[in-house]
Image (spheres, grey):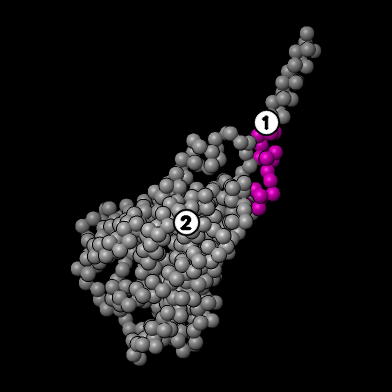
Amino acid sequence: MISLATGGFMEFMSTQLVQFLEYTGFANVTWGHIAMILIGLMFIFLGIKYEFEPLLLVPIGFGMLIGNIPFYPGLKIGIYEQGSVLNILYHGVQNGWYPPLIFLGIGAMTDFSALLSNPKLMLIGAAAQVGIFAAYTAALGLGFEPNEAGAIGIIGGADGPTAIFISSQLAPDLMGAIAVSAYSYMALVPVIQPPIMRLLTTKKERTIRMKPPRQVSKLEKITFPIIGLLFCAFIVPSGLPLLGMLFFGNLLKECGVTKRLSDVASNAIVNICTLLIGITVGASTQASVFLSLDSVKIFGLGAGSFVVATFCGVLFVKIMNLFLKEGNKINPLIGNSGVSAVPDAARVSNNVGLEYDKTNYLLQHAMGPNVAGVVGSAVAAGILLAFLH
């Protein structure tokens, strides 16, 4: 009897051990999981070692690790399993909840003075949006459906929240690849843009000194978000979720009587949403869903659109200078900042300018087209939604 009991116990333990091993990550791992984990580690490395947008790359990279731990199906732990914690958090991405809240924080952090002091800089922000429509056209050529092409094209605006918002409306199945692509290229602004800026400009152009921006009155700062909202939203009402929150956040900052609300929007809200977007977007790169030919195409199109946006911004300034008098010319190095990567694109303009003239600070000027790019990408998103939704 003892031996039978012992034998039964050993068989039970053996069965349990086999079942345990079936549930481990080692039993369910694929080469795809390993590849995505390595990419996640690379993101973390770039964020920490080189400080390439660490607030984005570190959460996304760690999210990739979380999303690519192999698991036995049905445990309700994966981001694509209904009812799991990650899936519930991912609803804010899938349904476009987080991007408007981030735009609220961006508005509360942004000073539009550089743009208001020199309104023609807004044209540079508009010119940089050509990358969006170039990528849209290229995506159609590669066989994507019009709604998918529109979602992919927005990567050219270098605006992660806008890319998430548009893909949630137009191409939810491609959201993971689009979001990771958009945030990746935002983080790589200091790597991608300088060579293009140097290629398109002469040494003389890089040392152009711009007039100091004029002092902007408080009344101008207060009325700008109100007029900006009414003007932009009447043109593209479909961009209202982003534009409305952006201008509302800016009004909270500039009106001077809602400092507590402005502080919450620019700190707690934007930080929480950035964390949640980063970790869930990273986790959405689950190898079984993410690794596909479409993802490769999206990354290629994203890179192309970003390059086109930078080209168009710089070239547009050079064209503008043909019509501007001496003394009023614009340094074409700020053309790159027409994309919506605030404030990194403006910092790149400043840093490249300082390489050729240690006393020529372009940051205050570059912030004009940079914040115009934020508005421009939201308007472009509204246009795409109006045509494709």
Three-letter code for the amino acid on which mark 2 is drawn: Asn
Q: Nearer the viewer, mark 1 or mark 2?
A: 2
> Magenta region: which residues?
20-36
| Residue 204 position (above or below residue 5) | below
Residue 15 seen from this side: yes
Residue that badge 1 annotates? 20
Q: Is residue 57 visible?
A: no
Q: Residue furthest right?
A: 3
Q: How many marks?
A: 2
Position of residue 21 in the picture relative to residue 309 (left or right): right
The amino acid marked with disc number 1 is: Phe
Picture quarter with the C terminus: bottom left
> Which residue is drawn at the image coordinates 46% and 84% (left, top)?
206
Q: Position of residue 189 (x, y in %)?
A: 50, 68
Query: Circle 2 is placed at which residue position?
Result: 147
Give the quarter of the image for residue 215.
bottom left
Q: Residue at x 64, y 54 (%)?
A: 38
Label 1 CA crowd tier, 10 Å (few <14, some 14–19, many 20+): few
Mark 1 near mark 2, Cβ–Cβ under 8 Å? Answer: no
Q: Is residue 238 left or right of residue 52?
A: left
Question: Which of these two is toward me, 18 or 225?
Answer: 225
Whether the magenta-drawn stretch holds residue 72 is answered as no
Residue 361 percent coordinates (x, y)? 40, 79
Residue 254, relative to residue 320: is it above or below?
above
Q: State which tag comes first along the sequence, 1 or 2.
A: 1
Q: CA distance from mark 1 to mark 2?
A: 44 Å
Residue at image location 46% in from the left, 40% down from the top:
88
